[in-house]
Image (cartoon, rainbow, N blue to C red):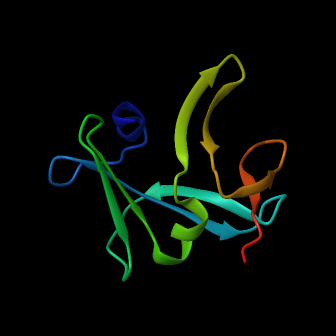
Amino acid sequence: MKSLCEKNAILPREGAYELRFGVAAGGCAGFQYVLEPYESPLEGDSEFFFSDLGVRIYVGEKSFQFLQGTRIDYRQDFLGSSFMYENPNMQESCGCQTSFSPKKCC
């Protein structure tokens, strides 16, 4: 993760790289994942610090319900590189694995 941040000119603050992870409306299945440089705190942000990776990930209050328990993996193969998401809150995903529809609640 650190090398990916460096490659994309994301500079560390306070000894850690900081990223915002969330969801936005869109994509093939209704919601798409958003992983971007962290700019500033928002009300209701949850912070997750992975000291072994030197990365802080912030998840907004509205996205948290859709992302709780999600595992993020970065993969490289002969076709290129991408993030893969293992999301227990997903009902179904599009073929490219970058968007999903959430499980129905209640």
In the picture provided, is 25 more to the left or to the right than 20? right
* Residue found farthest to the front: 106
The quarter holding residue 45 reads bottom left
When the figure is inspected, residue 95 is found, relative to residue 37, above or below; the finding is above
Q: Position of residue 71 (x, y in %)?
A: 53, 43
From the viewer's perspective, is residue 38 above or below residue 97?
below
| Picture quadrant of residue 28 | bottom right
Q: Residue at x 54, y 33 (%)?
A: 74
Relative horizontal placement of residue 61, taking residue 28 as reference (left or right): left
Compared with 44, 79 (above or below) is above
Residue sitting at 38 percent across and 80 percent down? 44
Quadrant location of the C terminus in the rendered image: bottom right
The residue located at (41%, 35%) in the rendering is: 7
Q: Position of residue 51 (x, y in %)?
A: 23, 41
Task: Point out residue 4 in the picture as x, y percentages from the top left corner.
Answer: 42, 35
x%, y% of residue 34? 58, 59
User: Which quadrant of the figure has residue 57?
Assistant: bottom left
Viewer-proximal residue, 92 or 105?
105
**On-image quarter of the N terminus:** top left
